[in-house]
Amino acid sequence: GQQVMQIPQYQHVQEGEDFTTYCNSSTTLSNIQWYKQRPGGHPVFLIQLVKSGEVKKQKRLTFQFGEAKKNSSLHITATQTTDVGTYFCAGPDYTDKLIFGTGTRLQVFP
Amino acid sequence: GAGVSQSPRYKVAKRGQDVALRCDPISGHVSLFWYQQALGQGPEFLTYFQNEAQLDKSGLPSDRFFAERPEGSVSTLKIQRTQQEDSAVYLCASSLDGPLREQFFGPGTRLTVL
């Protein structure tokens, strides 16, 4: 079945440093969604990308969808302690159900 | 209005017991999803409703798992004869219309089977 992998699994950064997580799907995706889950919390929708090569920005967060629509990335500039959490990408399979990635857990040290 | 709510937030069951988990989606949301999340992993799809119709139940691990949404609003996930491997967080999500839209998640029910 479709697999969605993310790297790295964990990332520890000093506050102010940048952070990037990469998402790779075994199949071409019609769109990709990103979610953030704080420790002990539930996933919260961040953004959806649909077009090949699309780039979207939300303040310090930059999301990119690959040209082949099989990979995506999330880059955070100048991390803050409020960025702590696990970031998941998710893409629909051929039946449109969301397949979540393995997640990248971000820890930010003040 | 209010977000997605789930009850109970925590449930401890003895192996072999039946449990029922409730989800109240955002009012007006047509689609409702159940996911299972094991510790340190991403949510895994269980089942999906469009109004009262269960359109996809391919993710349900066994016939011990059953979900319903009889009036197209509140949904219940029932697990019969619980086993230790059922221990996980069960997340409910809703979306305005369809699985390709933004999904709003509830706080989850943490199920522990002893």
Image (cartoon, rainbow, N blue to C red):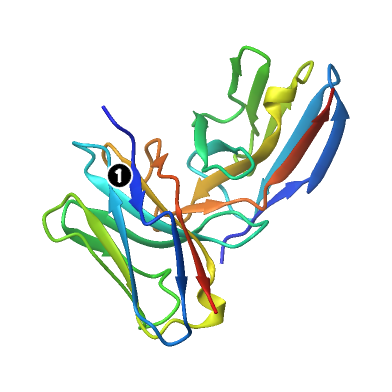
Q: At x 65% / y 34%, what residue is drawn?
A: A66
Q: Is any atom of residue A8 visible in this view? A: no
Quick check: A84 above or below A88?
above
Mark 1 — on which chain does it sit?
B
Q: At x 77% / y 31%, what residue is drawn?
A: A20
Quick check: B58 above or below A106?
below
Categorize mark 1 by other alpha carbons within 10 Å: few (<14), some (14-19), many (20+).
some
Q: At x 62% / y 50%, what residue is drawn?
A: A101
Residue annotated with mark 1? B98
Q: Is any atom of residue A3 visible in this view? A: yes
Q: Nearer the viewer, residue A19 or A96?
A: A19
Q: Secondary structure at mark 1?
A: loop
State which quadrant residue B96 falls in: top left
Quick check: B95 above or below B16?
above
Q: At x 73% / y 42%, what residue is drawn?
A: A105
Q: Position of residue A83 (x, y in %)?
A: 69, 26
Q: Amino acid at mark 1?
A: Gly
Going by the image, does A96 lie left or right of B38? left
Q: Position of residue A96 (x, y in %)?
A: 40, 52
Quarter the C terminus of chain A occupies = top right
Q: Nearer the viewer, residue B13 or B104?
A: B13
Quick check: B86 above or below A74?
below
Q: Position of residue B21 (x, y in %)?
A: 34, 63
Residue at the left extreme, as displayed: B71
State which quadrant residue A14 falls in: top right
